[in-house]
Image (cartoon, rainbow, N blue to C red):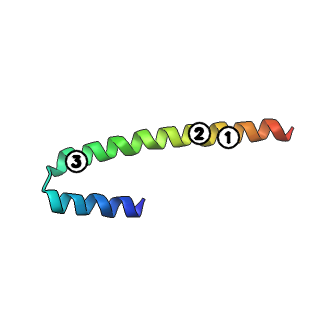
Amino acid sequence: MILWGIVAFVYLLVFRTERRMFGLLYGAYYLIYLIFETACFYMNEKRQVRQSK
């Protein structure tokens, strides 16, 4: 996550994009990624509990 933040900061400096729009898109991407990652972990944990019974 820290590496991705550094890459995003360098991108802002090099290409001089609009910071507000970039921040909104970055935040939206992160939230979508977080939702899918949480769902995958939840399904894996649920599967492991069923298999251990």
In percent of the image, x 47 and y 43: which residue is there? 34
Which secondary structure, mark 3? helix
Residue denoted by label 1: 44
Left or right for 2, reference 36: left
In percent of the image, x 25 and y 61: which residue is there? 9
Instruction: Work out whether mark 1 precedes mark 3 in sequence or the reverse, and give the earlier one.
Output: 3
Task: Return the x and y of residue 12 as percentages of the image width and height.
Answer: 20, 58
Determine whether label 2 and label 1 are within 8 Å by CB: yes
Which amino acid lies under the numbered mark 2 shown in the image of this protein? Cys
Which amino acid lies under the numbered mark 3 shown in the image of this protein? Phe
Task: Return the x and y of residue 40 as percentages of the image width and height.
Answer: 59, 39
Between marks 2 and 1, how big is the CA–CA gap? 6 Å
- Residue 39, quarter of the rendered image: top right
Between marks 1 and 3, how big is the CA–CA gap? 33 Å
In percent of the image, x 40 and y 42: which residue is there? 31
Q: Which mark is residue 22?
A: 3
